[in-house]
Amino acid sequence: DAEITQSPRHKITETGRQVTLACHQTWNHNNMFWYRQDLGHGLRLIHYSYGVQDTNKGEVSDGYSVSRSNTEDLPLTLESAASSQTSVYFCASSERDPGELFFGEGSRLTVL
Amino acid sequence: GQNIDQPTEMTATEGAIVQINCTYQTSGFNGLFWYQQHAGEAPTFLSYNVLDGLEEKGRFSSFLSRSKGYSYLLLKELQMKDSASYLCAVRDSNYQLIWGAGTKLIIKP
C-alpha cells in the first residue's frame, strides 16, 4: 500500500543545532507540504513543492528550508533550531487537488 | 486578514447528533474541507464542499453557505470512536489552505 512516512517521530535537540526531518511518500504525488501544528493554532504551512526542483515558502517559512531532488522525498531542515520551533510537524502530499491531503504520522520536535 | 473560526470544544452523547460550525473570512474561496484528527495522530480527510448545499457521506454530512461564509459538519449516531478534533480548512484565491484551530469533540457514554 502507498504511504507517507516521517522520521524521526520524536526528536529532542538543543538551541542552535541543525535538524532535518525526513518525509517520504510512495503515492507518487507531485505535491508535498510541510506544516506545523501548535496548540491554539490551526495547521500552518511552512514550505511546499509542486514537483521536483520546485519549492515555495509558506506563511511561517523563516528558519526552515526544503529541497526536492526527487518525487518521493521532501526533507525539512531547521538551520539553527530555536525554542519557538518546538512543535509537531506534519508532512503531507496530494495528487492534484491541493486540498485533499494525505498526512504523515507527524514528528514531535522539542528544542531545549 | 484571513480567519477561520470554530468552537474550541464540544461535548455530545453516544448515539446523538452533533453539529460543528465553521465560519470563515478569506481572500477568495475555492472550497472548504473538513478533516478528522484523533489525539496524537495525523489528520484524515472527511469532506469537501465547493458549492452551496449539503454533502452526505454515511453518518457524516457537511453543509456550505458561501454567501454567509459558513459551514457545518453534522455527525449522526455518534460513536465513542468519533471522539477527535475536527478541522475546518478553506482554500483561498491562491489555492492555499487556511486552517481553523480545530474543534475537540468529546463523546460521553
Image: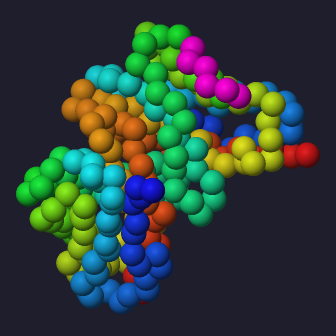
Instruction: Name the magenta segment's main secondary structure.
Output: strand
Give how far across and how far down residue B83 sits, in percent: 73, 48
Range of residues picked out in magenta: B54-59
Q: Quadrant of the N terminus of chain A?
A: bottom left
Using the rendered image of the protein, determine whether residue A90 is visible from the camera's viewpoint. Answer: no
Give how far across and how far down residue A62 sits, in percent: 21, 63
Q: Residue at x 46, y 75 (%)?
A: A9
Furthest-front residue in view? A1
* A101 is higher (above) or lower (below) than A38: above
Give how far across and how far down residue A70 sits, in percent: 16, 62
Q: In screen coordinates, is B103 left or right of A103?
A: right
Q: Which quarter of the figure has residue B40?
A: bottom right
The question of residue B55 being in magenta is answered with yes
Q: Residue at x 61, y 20 (%)?
A: B56
Is A91 in front, or is A46?
A: A91
Q: Residue at x 54, y 22 (%)?
A: B71
Give how far across and how far down residue A67 sits, in percent: 15, 65
* A75 is higher (above) or lower (below) than B75: below
Is B5 in front, or is A47?
A: A47
Identify the colour scheme used: rainbow
Q: Residue at x 19, y 65 (%)?
A: A66
The question of residue A88 being in magenta is answered with no
Q: Which quarter of the figure has residue B26?
A: top left
